Image (spheres, coloured by chain):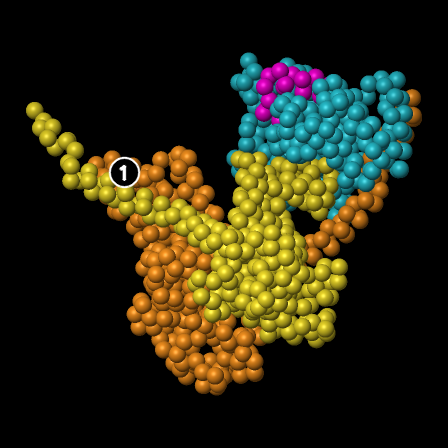
Chain colours: A cyan, B orange, C yellow
C-alpha cells in the first residue's frame, strides 16, 4: 500500500514543479566513484549529478567502461564478477553501496533495459506484469491495468492490444525492445538505465525508441549509454563524455548540457572526439 | 516560492530514500527465506545420492574385511562360505571382457570412421545415427534375448559359452564405443585432414595416418568405459544361459563360463552370515575395485590426452 | 612436357580404397542389423506365442504363471509391478535429480561443481547387481528398524530406492544441460527488475528449460522400466496386481516386474520349444516397445529445447 501512496504524492509534487519555472532537481549524485574488477581499476574517480526527469547520455569510445559505469547505478556489476566500489553513489542522499542497502530493493527503484532485447519466453502479458507479480500483486484486474498503462507508455499498446496472450518472442526486434521497456516501466522505478537500447535495431525501430524516450522522461529519469553521437545529441538533455586513460581506466572528461557539449565543448579531448565523429 | 521548492526537495529526497529502503512491502524478505530453504534442499538433494552410496560402500567394505584374502581369489566357489572363492568366475569375467574388447574395438571404430569420414551428411547417415542412440537406450535384458534368440536358437551355438557371451555383450556396448569414438574423431581438427589430403593421400591413408592416431586416446577412453560397463552386466548373460556358479575356469571360447556379477547374484540368494555379510561383499569389493581401476585408467588417459594438447 | 601417366587413377589402389570404405560401411550397418535382429527375434517368437496364447489372455488376465501349473499368461501383474517400481524409483530420482541439477547449474561455484558432478556420475557406474544386493542386505533391514517395521524381506520399496539413486545422474546431467542453456540475459533481465535469485530461478530459468527437464524425466523413467537385477534380487518374485490404495500393502511387499519375470523364465529349465520359453519373448517385446516409445519421446523433447537456444 505504501508504494501507491508515494506515487500519488509524487504526482502532486511533479505538477507543482511544472507550474513553477523549470528547475533542476538532482536525483542521483556521484562523488569520486571508482570501480574495480578484482584488482583492475575499470572506472576512475567519477563525480557528476543526474537530474530528475532529464535524459542523460553517456558517450565515449568503445571499451571505455560506459556500460560498466551504467551497471554501477543499479549494482548489477556485483552479479557478474569480483566487483568493488570506492566513492559514493547517492540516491536521495543515501549511498546505495552502504551495507544496509538491499541491492534487490534498489533494482526496483532503478530499472534497466539491455542492449539485446531479452523478453522472457512467456506471453506479452506475463512479461509486462512479471515485476508486479514477483512483488506480490495477485489481483488480475490490477495487473491488467498496470500492463495496459505500461504498454501505452512504451508505445506498444496499439500494436499488441487484444493479443497479450501471444508469446513475446513472436514480436519483431523493435517491438521486443519496447516490450522490455514496458516491463521495466511497469514496476514504476525512479530511474531507467538503458544500455545502447537501439543498437541492435533497424533505423526505423531506433527512431521509435528515441521518440519514446522523450515521452518517458516526463515521468522517469533516464540514463542512456550510446555509441551513436547523433542519437545522444537528438535525445538527451545532458551528456557525459568518457575516455580511457593510460592505465585503461575509464574517466569522466566532460559533463554538461548536451547543447553545450556538442556546440561548445570546454575540453579539447571532447572537441576532438566530437568533431572526429560528428563533423 | 523558494521556500516551497526547498521543502519539496527535502521531502522528495526523503521519499526517495524511503522508497529505496522500504519499497513494495516485505515481499523480499519472504522470498529470500524461501530462497534459502530451497537452496538448502537443493544441496541436500545433490549430496543425498553421494552420501547414501558412500554409506553403502562403507558397509560393504566393512563386511568384506577379513573375507577378502588370497584364498578367496584363488579358490572355486563352494557351499561353504569360508571355503568359497571366485577364481573361476573371475577368469570368466576377464576372458569375456577381453573378447568384447577384441570384437568391439574394430567394429565400433569402423562404424565411427564410416559415420565421420566416409558417409555423406544425408538422411541415411542421420537414420544410422538415430538408430545407434536408440540402441543405447534398449534395456540390457533385451540384448540377452537377442543373444538367446539369434546366437543360440538360430545359429545353434551352445548355451552359456564364452563366445556367445562375448558376442552378446559386444552388441550391448557397441553403441558406447561408437559414440565415444565419433566424438574423439570429431575432435581432430579439419585442418589436419586437409593438410594430409592436400599432399595427395587417399582417404584411407589420411584416416589411418592422421585421424586415428590423433583420436586414439579418446577412442581408448571410450573403450575402457564400455568394457567397465560390460564387466558389470548380468541380465544378458543370464538369458544366454551362462551359469551363475561354476567350478572350473573356462579355457577356450567354447567353454561354459560364469562372471563375477552372476556369482554375486547367485550368492545374494544364499542365507547365512557367511554369505550375506562375508563372501558376497568380498566379491562385490573385487568387482568394484576392478571397475574403479578401469574408470580411473580412463580418467587418467583423458587427462594425459588433454595435457598433450 | 609433363607425363600425365602419373596422374591416372590406379585400379588396384582404387580397389583398396573402395574395399576399406565398404568395410567401414559394414561396421556401421551392423548397428542397423542389431536393431533388425532384435525386432525379428522378438517378433518371431512372440507371433508363435500369440498363436498359442490369445492376446486377450495376455493383456487382460491377472495371473502370470508361465512355469507352474495351471499355466496362465496374464501380463497385467507384471505391468503393475513395473509401474509400481518405476513410480517409486521416479519419486526418488526425478525431484532429487532436478534439484541437484538446479544446484549445480545456478548456485554451485565452479570448483564445487567440478567435484560434485563426477561424484554424481559414480552413482551410475555401480552395477545394478550390487545395488540389488545393497537393497536386500542393507536398505531393507535399515527400513525395518526405522520407518517400516512391517516391511518384508523382499519388497519393492528398497529396490526402488537404490535404483532411484542409480538414475539420479541421468536426470541431473540432462536437466543441468538444459538449465545452463538458458541464456544469461534472461536471468539478468529478472535481476534487473529487482527480483530475488530464487524467484528468477523458479519463474524464468526452470520454465525456460522445461523441455530438456521433461526429456531427462522421460529418460530416467525409461531406465527404471528396463532395470533388471536390482529388482530381481531385492524385489522378490511374486507376481501380483499392486493395490495402490493400500500403500503399506503395495510397497512393503514383494512384486515381480516384467524384467524380473523374464529372468525367472530364463533361469528355469524350460525347453526351447515351450510356450513358457516363448512367453519370455512376448514380455520382451512389450518391454522393448515401451522403452523405445519413451526414448523417442525423450529425444523429441530434447530437440525442442536444443532448437530454442541454437
Residue B162 appears in the picture as rendered = yes
Residue C164 appears in the picture as rendered = no
Chain identity of mark 1 = B
| Residue at mark 1 | B195
The residue under the point 77% across, 40% down is A134
Left or right: residue B70 versus residue A220 is left
The residue under the point 67% across, 72% down is C152
Q: Is residue C47 above or below residue B55?
A: above
Question: Callout 1: helix, strand or loop?
Answer: helix
Q: Quadrant of residue A258?
A: top right
Q: Quadrant of residue B50?
A: bottom right
Magenta span dominant secondary structure: helix
Left or right: residue A191 versus residue A141 is left
Q: Quadrant of residue A143?
A: top right
Q: Is residue A242 above or below residue B70?
A: above
Q: Nearer the viewer, residue B10 or C153?
A: C153
Number of numbered discs present? 1
List x then y, in percent, for residue B176: 43, 53
Which region shows up in magenta?
A196-214
List x then y, in percent, for residue C80: 64, 58
List x then y, in percent, for residue B14: 86, 36
Q: Is residue A200 magenta?
A: yes
Query: Residue farthest to the left?
Result: C1
**Callout 1: 10 Å neighbours few (<14), some, many (20+)?**
few
Quarter of the image containing the N terminus of chain C?
top left
Q: Nearer the viewer, residue B170 or A76?
A: B170
Q: Is residue A171 magenta?
A: no
The residue under the point 46% across, 47% down is B133
Q: Is residue C299 above or below residue B63?
A: above
The residue under the point 61% across, 42% down is C211
Amino acid at each position: 500500500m505504501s508504494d501507491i501512496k508515494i506515487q500519488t504524492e509524487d504526482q502532486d509534487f511533479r505538477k507543482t514543479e511544472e507550474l513553477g519555472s523549470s528547475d533542476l532537481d538532482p536525483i542521483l549524485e556521484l562523488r569520486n566513484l571508482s570501480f574495480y574488477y578484482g584488482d583492475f581499476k575499470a572506472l576512475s574517480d567519477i563525480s557528476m549529478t543526474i537530474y530528475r526527469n532529464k535524459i542523460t547520455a553517456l558517450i565515449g569510445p568503445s571499451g571505455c567502461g560506459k556500460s560498466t559505469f551504467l551497471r554501477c547505478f543499479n549494482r548489477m556489476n556485483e552479479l557478474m564478477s569480483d566487483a568493488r566500489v570506492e566513492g559514493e553513489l547517492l540516491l536521495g542522499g543515501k549511498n546505495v553501496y552502504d551495507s544496509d542497502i538491499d541491492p534487490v530493493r534498489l533494482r526496483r527503484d532503478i530499472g534497466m533495459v539491455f542492449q539485446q532485447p531479452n523478453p522472457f519466453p512467456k506471453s506479452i502479458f506475463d512479461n509486462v506484469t512479471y515485476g508486479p507479480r514477483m512483488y506480490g500483486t495477485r489481483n488480475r484486474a490490477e495487473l491488467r491495468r498496470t500492463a495496459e498503462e505500461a504498454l501505452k507508455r512504451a508505445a506498444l499498446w496499439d500494436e499488441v492490444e487484444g493479443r497479450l496472450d501471444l508469446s513475446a518472442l513472436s514480436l519483431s526486434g523493435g517491438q521486443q525492445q519496447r516490450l522490455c521497456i514496458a516491463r521495466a516501466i511497469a514496476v514504476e522505478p525512479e530511474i531507467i538505465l538503458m544500455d545502447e537500447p537501439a543498437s541492435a535495431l533497424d533505423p526505423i525501430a531506433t527512431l521509435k525508441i528515441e521518440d519514446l524516450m522523450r515521452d518517458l522522461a516526463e515521468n522517469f529519469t533516464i540514463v542512456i549509454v550510446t555509441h551513436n553521437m547523433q542519437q545522444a545529441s537528438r535525445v538527451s538533455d545532458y551528456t557525459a563524455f568518457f575516455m580511457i586513460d593510460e592505465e585503461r581506466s575509464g574517466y569522466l572528461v566532460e559533463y554538461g548540457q548536451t547543447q553545450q557539449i556538442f556546440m561548445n565543448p570546454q575540453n579539447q579531448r571532447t572537441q576532438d572526439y566530437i568533431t572526429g565523429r560528428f563533423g | 516560492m523558494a521556500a516551497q521548492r526547498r521543502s519539496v526537495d527535502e521531502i522528495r529526497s526523503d521519499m526517495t530514500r524511503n522508497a529505496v529502503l522500504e519499497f513494495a512491502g516485505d515481499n523480499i524478505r519472504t522470498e529470500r527465506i524461501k530462497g534459502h530453504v530451497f537452496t538448502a534442499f537443493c544441496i541436500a538433494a545433490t549430496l543425498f545420492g553421494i552420501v547414501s552410496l558412500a554409506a553403502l560402500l562403507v558397509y560393504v567394505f566393512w563386511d568384506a574385511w577379513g573375507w577378502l584374502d588370497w584364498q578367496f581369489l584363488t579358490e572355486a566357489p563352494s557351499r561353504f562360505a569360508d571355503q568359497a572363492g571366485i577364481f573361476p568366475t573371475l577368469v570368466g569375467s576377464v576372458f569375456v571382457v577381453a573378447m568384447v574388447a577384441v570384437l568391439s574395438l574394430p567394429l565400433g571404430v569402423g562404424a565411427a570412421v564410416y559415420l565421420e569420414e566416409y558417409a555423406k551428411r544425408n538422411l541415411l547417415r542421420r537414420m544410422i545415427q538415430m538408430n545407434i542412440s536408440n540402441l543405447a537406450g534398449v534395456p540390457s535384458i533385451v540384448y540377452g534375448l537377442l543373444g538367446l534368440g539369434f546366437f543360440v536358437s538360430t545359429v545353434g551355438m551352445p548355451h552359456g559359452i564364452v563366445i556367445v557371451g562375448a558376442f552378446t555383450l559386444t552388441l550391448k556396448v557397441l553403441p558406447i564405443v561408437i559414440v565415444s569414438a565419433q566424438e574423439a574423431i570429431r575432435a581432430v581438427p579439419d585442418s589436419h585432414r586437409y593438410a594430409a589430403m592436400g599432399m595427395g593421400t587417399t582417404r584411407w591413408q589420411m584416416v589411418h595416418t592422421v585421424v586415428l592416431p590423433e583420436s586414439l586416446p579418446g577412442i581408448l577412453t571410450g573403450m575402457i568405459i564400455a568394457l567397465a560397463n560390460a564387466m558389470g552386466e548380468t541380465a544378458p548373460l543370464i538369458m544366454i544361459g551362462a551359469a551363475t556358479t561354476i567350478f572350473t575356469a573356462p579355457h577356450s571360447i567354447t567353454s561354459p563360463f560364469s562372471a563375477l556379477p552372476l556369482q554375486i547374484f547367485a550368492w545374494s540368494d544364499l542365507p547365512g552370515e557367511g554369505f550375506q555379510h562375508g563372501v558376497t561383499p568380498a566379491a562385490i569389493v573385487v568387482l568394484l575395485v576392478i571397475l574403479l581401476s578401469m574408470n580411473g585408467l580412463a580418467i587418467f588417459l583423458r587427462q594425459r590426452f588433454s595435457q598433450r594438447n | 612436357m609433363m607425363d600425365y601417366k602419373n596422374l591416372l587413377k590406379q585400379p588396384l589402389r582404387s580397389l583398396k580404397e573402395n574395399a576399406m570404405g565398404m568395410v567401414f560401411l559394414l561396421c556401421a550397418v551392423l548397428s542397423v542389423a542389431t536393431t533388425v535382429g532384435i525386432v525379428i527375434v522378438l517378433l518371431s517368437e512372440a507371433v508363435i506365442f500369440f498363436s498359442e496364447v490369445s492376446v486377450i489372455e495376455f493383456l487382460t488376465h491377472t495371473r502370470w504363471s508361465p512355469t507352474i501349473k495351471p499355466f496362465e499368461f496374464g501380463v497385467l501383474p507384471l505391468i503393475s509391478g513395473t509401474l509400481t517400481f518405476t513410480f517409486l524409483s521416479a519419486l526418488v530420482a526425478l525431484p532429487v535429480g532436478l534439484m541437484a541439477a538446479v544446484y549445480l547449474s545456478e548456485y554451485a561455484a565452479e570448483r564445487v561443481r567440478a567435484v560434485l558432478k563426477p561424484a554424481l556420475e559414480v552413482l551410475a557406474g555401480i552395477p545394478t547387481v550390487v545395488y540389488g544386493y545393497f537393497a536386500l542386505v542393507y536398505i531393507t533391514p535399515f527400513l525395518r528398524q526405522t520407518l517400516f517395521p512391517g516391511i518384508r524381506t523382499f519388497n519393492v520399496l528398497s529396490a526402488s530406492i537404490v535404483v532411484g539413486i542409480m538414475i539420479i545422474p541421468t536426470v541431473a546431467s540432462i536437466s543441468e544441460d538444459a538449465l545452463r542453456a538458458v541464456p544469461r540475459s534472461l536471468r539478468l533481465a529478472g535481476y534487473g527488475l529487482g527480483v530475488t535469485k530464487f524467484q528468477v530461478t523458479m519463474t524464468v530459468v526452470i520454465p525456460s528449460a522445461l523441455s530438456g527437464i521433461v526429456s531427462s524425466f522421460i529418460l530416467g523413467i525409461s531406465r527404471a522400466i528396463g532395470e533388471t537385477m536390482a529388482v530381481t534380487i531385492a524385489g522378490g518374485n511374486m507376481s501380483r496386481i499392486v493395490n495402490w490404495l493400500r500403500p503399506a500393502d503395495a510397497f512393503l511387499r514383494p512384486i515381480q516386474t516384467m524384467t524380473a519375470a523374464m529372468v525367472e523364465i530364463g533361469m528355469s529349465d524350460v525347453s526351447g520349444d515351450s510356450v513358457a520359453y516363448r512367453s519370455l519373448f512376448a514380455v520382451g517385446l512389450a518391454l522393448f516397445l515401451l522403452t523405445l516409445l519413451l526414448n523417442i519421446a525423450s529425444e523429441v523433447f530434447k530437440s525442442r529445447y536444443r532448437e530454442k537456444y541454437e
